[in-house]
Image (cartoon, grey):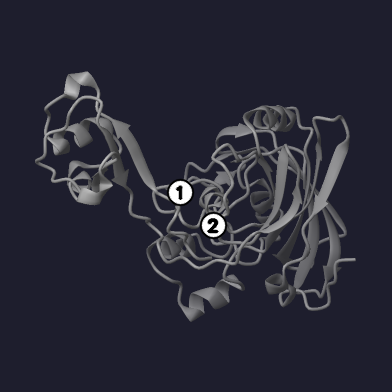
């Protein structure tokens, strides 16, 4: 992925009358409440009506009605990711095959590596909105609403469980032909990490059906059909059933691998323990209603980078 210089990243601000004559740094401290004063002092601020002058000094006085643009440095500038593949596009819906590594929405540490930013670089307007979640490390089908009305329709359909999601995953061990995990999920009280585990605080009903497609005795490929939509549900249910996903840093061999991955690149030994650099979970198929009343089904092919984990498996 290459960043597009034509896409501006930052905040557009208008000086209200009560702030007329204030120093710029004082005004920024008032308006950018989630940014520390020290960080705000390092941000470049442009006058929207006279950008040719370059960044304004923080000691400059702002005037009522002045339009400012505060440049936001990309926290993940230089990130390189394979682009999503467009599976379907119409007036209401855009369906993508998301490679692992992309987040749906910007966070404190991700911006360039988000679908929202990719959509902007590709010329799509700001109304385009992902209508369901897909973890950063999970690949596969994700639906994007193209208008506010479509977003309302699809989010209501999601709340009414009108979406049918089918995943593929590679797990450790020889899984049985069929397995149902009906295990309430909540936060684990015994860890600082917010891991969803049974008998945890605020546990809610959760159910996942698994079906084995392939095994060599050491690993298995499963179809996973979540009935409910709890956070990390497939990953947690697979782990609690004795068959953790290959490459899962949270629910795999050691949660310390997850903490280490937040601070640095994992070592070769750590990656060997995981079995794969990312969790082997792929959103294979998505069936969802359309505003026209029919049901549409979209599929994303099995990623090549997961094929080596199950060399005898082919998706027919």
The residue that label 2 is drawn on is: 250
State the image quarter where residue 5 is shown: bottom left
Residue closest to the eye, 276 or 40:
40
Q: Is residue 144 visible?
A: yes
Point out residue 218 in the picture as x, y percentages from the top left corner: 75, 74
The residue that label 1 is drawn on is: 193
Alpha carbon of mark 1 to alpha carbon of mark 2: how far?
9 Å
Residue closest to the eye, 83 or 196:
83
Residue closest to the eye, 247 or 2:
2
Q: Is residue 43 visible?
A: no
Point out residue 240 in the picture as x, y percentages from the top left corner: 67, 52
* Label 2 SS: loop
Residue appearing at x 45%, y 49% in the figure: 193
* Label 1 SS: loop
Point out residue 97 in the picture as x, y percentages from the top left corner: 70, 57
State the image quarter where residue 25 is shown: top left
Left or right of 66, for residue 4:
right
Q: Residues within 10 Å of mark 2 (few under 14, many from 20)?
A: many
Residue that lies at the very extreme toward the left in this rendered image: 59
Q: Are marks 1 and 2 in contact (CB under 8 Å)?
A: yes
């Amino acid at each position: 992925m290459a960043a597009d210089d034509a896409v501006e990243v930052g905040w557009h601000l208008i000086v209200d009358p009560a702030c007329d004559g204030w120093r710029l740094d004082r005004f920024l401290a008032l308006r950018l409440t989630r940014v520390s004063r020290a960080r705000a002092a390092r941000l470049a601020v442009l006058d929207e009506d006279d950008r040719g002058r370059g960044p304004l000094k923080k000691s400059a006085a702002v005037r009522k009605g002045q339009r400012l643009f505060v440049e936001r440095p990309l926290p993940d500038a230089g990130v390189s990711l394979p682009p999503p593949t467009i599976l379907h596009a119409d007036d209401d819906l855009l369906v993508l095959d998301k490679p692992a590594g992309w987040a749906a929405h910007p966070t404190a540490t991700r911006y360039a590596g988000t679908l929202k930013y990719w959509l902007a670089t590709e010329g799509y307007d700001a109304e385009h909105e992902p209508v369901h979640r897909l973890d950063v490390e999970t690949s596969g089908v994700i639906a994007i609403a193209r208008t506010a009305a479509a977003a309302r329709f699809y989010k209501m359909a999601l709340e009414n469980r009108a979406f049918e999601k089918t995943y593929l995953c590679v797990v450790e061990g020889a899984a049985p032909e069929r397995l149902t995990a009906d295990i309430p999920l909540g936060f684990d009280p015994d860890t600082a990490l917010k891991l969803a585990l049974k008998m945890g605080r605020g546990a809610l009903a959760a159910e996942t059906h698994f079906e084995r497609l392939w095994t060599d005795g050491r690993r298995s490929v499963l179809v996973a059909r979540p009935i409910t939509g709890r956070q990390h549900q497939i990953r947690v249910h697979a782990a609690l059933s004795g068959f953790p996903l290959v490459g899962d840093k949270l629910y795999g061999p050691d949660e310390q691998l997850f903490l280490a991955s937040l601070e640095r690149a994992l070592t070769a030994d750590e990656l060997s323990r995981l079995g794969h650099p990312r969790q082997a979970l792929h959103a294979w198929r998505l069936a969802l209603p359309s505003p026209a009343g029919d049901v549409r089904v979209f599929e994303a092919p099995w990623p090549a980078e997961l094929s080596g984990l199950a060399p005898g498996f082919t998706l027919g």
